[in-house]
Image (cartoon, helix red, strand yellow):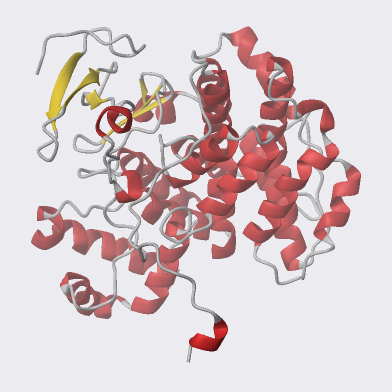
Amino acid sequence: MADKLSDSKPSKNAHTVTLTDNFTGKTCELPVLKGSEGPMVIDVRRLYAETGHFTYDPGFTSTGSCESAITYIDGDEGILMHRGYSIEDLAAKSSFMEVCYLLLQGELPTKKQRSAFESTITYHTMLHEQMLNLYRGFRRDSHPMAIMVGVVGALSAFYHDSTDISDPRQRMIASHRLIAKMPTIAAMAYKYSIGQPFVYPRNDLNYAENFLYMIFAVPCEEFIVRPAVARAMDRIFILHADHEQNASTSTVRIAGSSGANPFACIAAGIASLWGPAHGGANEAVLQMLHEIGSKDKIPEFLKRAKDRNDPFRLMGFGHRVYKNYDPRAAVLRESCHEVLEDLGVRDDPLLDLAMELERIALEDPYFVEKKLFPNVDFYSGIILKAMGFPTSMFTVLFALARTVGWVAQWQEMIEDPNHRISRPRQLYTGPSKRPFVPMAKRG
């Protein structure tokens, strides 16, 4: 490794690596970039031009797709930070609105800035009245995520004054609108699916309280938001606000790299999040608990989970990135037990089953050795069920919370002078060139 600096922005103290092509004997020097945290990164942008070779990395598990100053994860140590602040501190000492401001602006707000930001979000929560007609075009049994994808994508048809991505002011207006309107869109998707009238937002409630009000209130009686439930909802939003370059965030960035408007980009992110391996994981936790059925069957299913030849998987345990305890799960575990106690949930068989599964799995040497600890999806699924949300709404809530992360990542990408349209390459394994065979000669 040569002791040489690169001229790329994040590599002030970087070196280079020299690669030798054993087929041609050619050598190639590639910069090694160093960020403020995390491992050093080999910059392979010149690799094809100098060697004629691409890298091959299915799932991009060893590839940095962008430079970002928003979120840092150390999966081995169980660390998650937003703009340098630990997720534990943010969840315990901050609010979702403060975290939104932090992700968008880079710093925690002053008291005056927080008040102005909360006011802006509050007064953007209503939807254009004509958008209500969109909901009525869906079947009554439509999955709320299907409705979310459609309605969010349609925002660009109603808010033309914030789709010019070259205008910083329009980008910020679109960002505020998306964060503000997502709870209203989500709540209306839920109300439509159960045949209840839409409930309009209230400006006297905070973000989490307003969402719970729009979800559970009905016009014929007063609805009081329980403080413990609102706190837990706010904490769930914080814990899901951003998570670096996951599948849905990468989707938003890829869509945005083409110059697509922000509403279309976020709709693309929602579609990606819908997958059971991503945002649908907490819904899968509840489905797994239903499959297990009772406490006495837990040992049987744990045995199946250890069997590589058995398709059964223990959902809500382990994580693609975290090889230690998911730091979000540690925070949410406390909230989980608080909410269950506040709601007086003592006789719910499914929740009892979940708590027993958690206890046994945390004591099982197999899961402890492999560090398959309960993750954030395990506890969020339990909390949301206790609150009264159907499983079909779990991923919707994830999308609501993650919107600010998507928006912040999209903004960062647009403002990067070096950003280009995303265009991954491939390892082609199809037929080599062959002559065309006329129909008469094809047998």
Horizontal and vertical percent for residue 405? 52, 33
Residue 224 visible somewhere in the drawing: no
Q: Number of callouts in the render?
A: 0
For image coordinates 27% across by 59% down, the residue present is 358
For image coordinates 42% across by 23% down, the residue present is 68
Q: Looking at the picture, does residue 146 appear above or below residue 329?
A: below
Q: Looking at the picture, does residue 378 appear above or below residue 236?
A: below
Residue 310 visible somewhere in the drawing: yes
| In the image, farthest residue toward the right | 130
Q: Is residue 56 left or right of residue 288?
A: left
Horizontal and vertical percent for residue 246? 41, 42
For image coordinates 31% across by 51% down, the residue present is 58
Dividing the picture into quadrants, the one containing residue 61 is top left
Q: Looking at the picture, does residue 330 appear above or below residue 392?
A: above
For image coordinates 61% across by 15% down, the residue present is 114
Horizontal and vertical percent for residue 396? 59, 52
Q: Front-most of 2 and 140?
A: 2
Q: Front-most of 333 and 368?
A: 368
The quarter of the picture where the N terminus appears is top left
